Amino acid sequence: MSMHGGGRGGRKRPAKPQFTQMTLILEALLVFFATLVAYGLRVAPPATVWVVGGVTALVLLLIAGYVGRPGGYVAGSAAQVVVLAFGVLVPMMFVVGGLFVVLWVVSLRLGGRIDRERAEYDAAHPQA
């Protein structure tokens, strides 16, 4: 088994969707824990906290399944704004959500760069 591929003769999965999916999945966990904090701080009625937090976490997980398809990255980018908006209820979310915005941008840029470099390598080494 080689370290460069997905096994013997297997195709490499694109890096950009992998990175962005992982970011969104981790972000869904973040939103769940922020929902617990908002519930504990009683920043809004419990039903409101759970509906908003639960729906947001679920949407993040659904978007994670659609990255790489048309509109998937745009939806993921829009979700970053929603997560940052949680800072209104839990101020620390401005900081933690901001870190996830940075992770999202890095996932998009670095994943895209890795995929381009892989394509260039594969084009230059068709027998590999």
Image: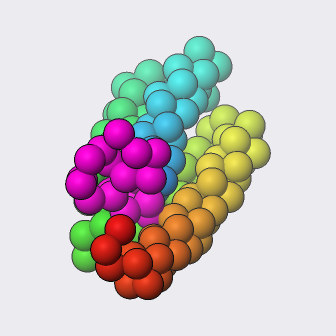
* Scheme of image coloration: rainbow
Q: Quadrant of the N terminus?
A: top left
* Rendered location of residue 66, percent (x, y): 26, 59
Res. 42 in view:
no
State the residue at coordinates (44%, 22%): 46
- Residue farthest toward the front in the current orientation of the protein: 127
Q: Nearer the viewer, residue 41 or 13?
A: 13
State the residue at coordinates (40%, 45%): 2
- For residue 34, what is the image quadrant? top right
Count numbered badges in the picture: 0
Q: Main secondary structure of the magenta part?
A: loop
- 46 vs 57: above or below: above
- 39 vs 116: above or below: above
Segment colored magenta: 1-18
State the residue at coordinates (52%, 75%): 117
| Residue 3 among those drawn in magenta | yes
Q: Nearer the viewer, residue 19 or 1?
A: 1
State the residue at coordinates (42%, 40%): 25
* Rendered location of residue 128, percent (x, y): 35, 68
- For residue 123, what is the image quadrant? bottom left
* Rendered location of residue 41, percent (x, y): 64, 19
Q: Is residue 41 left or right of residue 122?
A: right
| Residue 42 among those drawn in magenta | no
* Rendered location of residue 75, percent (x, y): 37, 66
Res. 120 in view:
yes
Q: Nearer the viewer, residue 46 or 31?
A: 31
Q: Is residue 128 left or right of residue 104?
A: left
